[in-house]
């Protein structure tokens, strides 16, 4: 699996629709200060479901929408799509190519799509569990993040190892099953209360 392309439109400094195409191997993005190199990384984080405006270097989520320049009006929405080559089927879907899209409008309305079909943020997260690609994965290492990992709490470091070992999805499923069990136990307690009131 590898990142084939990133398409941006109205995201941060990228007012025009723009497609970055990558090949299997190493790609470097170079440019003067402030030209938008980090915005490319932000775009990938964002489309993978980043909810923290701090991580995206803004003060509210609408800050990712192109805010205009002296010569150009602000835009009403931001869109990012990433396309991954999935011919090795590392992502648990039948498609050889997977495109994930996120859109946000100034009204606050937003949407996620997988291969053009609307989905929930949760579906995007589940698609990338245990691949190292999700927003909590280790595929994007930002400035200062190595220090954060080295100095982080053991539990935080453990999460990275869990992701690399491919057990995150099982842990999530266990948590969700435990939650269901707990809910069912509460229902049973309630039914028993009602029964004892009736008898
Ligand atoms: P450096 O080399 O200094 O780290 P960089 O190439 O990584 O710089 P970025 O931080 O990616 O640059 O881009 C910063 C630029 O993006 C700034 O010029 C900023 O004005 C612009 N920018 C950020 N958000 C928006 C937005 N919503 N609308 C328009 N421009 C934006």
Image (tube, helix red, strand yellow):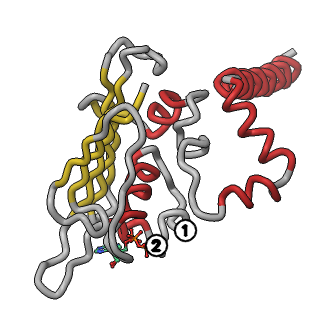
Residue pictured at 34% horizontal, 36% vertical: 100
On the picture, is 92 further left or further right than 84?
Answer: right
150 shown above or below 67: above
On the picture, is 118 further left or further right than 155?
Answer: left
Res 33 → quadrant? bottom left
Residue pictured at 67% horizontal, 32% vertical: 163
Residue pictured at 54% horizontal, 48% vertical: 140
Establish whether ligand 1 lies closer than 8 Å to the Cβ of label 2.
Answer: yes
Establish whether ligand 1 lies closer than 8 Å to the Cβ of label 1.
Answer: no
Indicate the position of residue 152 as horizontal and vertical percent values: 80, 56
Residue at the spot of label 2: 58
View extreme (top): residue: 94
Helix, strand, or loop for circle 2?
A: loop
Q: Quadrant of ligand 1?
A: bottom left
168 shown above or below 60: above
Residue at the spot of label 1: 54
Q: 169 or 5: which is nearer to us?
A: 5
Indicate the position of residue 18 as horizontal and vertical percent values: 18, 53
**Quadrant position of the C terminus in the picture:** top right
Helix, strand, or loop for circle 1?
A: loop
Contact (Cβ within 8 Å) of mark 2 with mark 1: yes
Q: How many marks?
A: 2
Indicate the position of residue 51 as horizontal and vertical percent values: 51, 56
Residue pictured at 68% horizontal, 30% vertical: 164
């Amino acid at each position: 699996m590898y990142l084939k392309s990133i398409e941006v439109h109205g995201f941060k400094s990228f007012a025009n629709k723009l497609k970055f195409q990558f090949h299997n191997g190493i790609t470097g993005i170079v440019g003067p200060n402030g030209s938008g190199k980090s915005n490319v990384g932000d775009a990938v984080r964002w489309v993978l479901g980043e909810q923290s405006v701090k991580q995206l270097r803004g003060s509210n989520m609408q800050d990712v929408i192109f805010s205009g320049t002296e010569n150009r009006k602000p835009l009403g929405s931001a869109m990012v799509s990433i396309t991954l080559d999935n011919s090795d089927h590392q992502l648990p879907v039948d498609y050889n190519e997977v495109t994930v899209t996120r859109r946000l409008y100034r009204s606050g309305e937003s949407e996620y799509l997988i291969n053009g079909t609307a989905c929930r943020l949760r579906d995007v997260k589940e698609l990338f569990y245990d691949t190292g690609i999700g927003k909590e994965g280790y595929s994007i290492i930002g400035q200062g993040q190595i220090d954060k990992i080295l100095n982080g709490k053991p539990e935080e470091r453990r999460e990275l190892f869990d992701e690399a070992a491919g057990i995150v999805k099982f842990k999530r499923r266990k948590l969700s099953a435990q939650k269901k069990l707990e809910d069912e136990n509460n229902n049973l307690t309630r039914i028993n209360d009602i029964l004892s009131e009736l008898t």
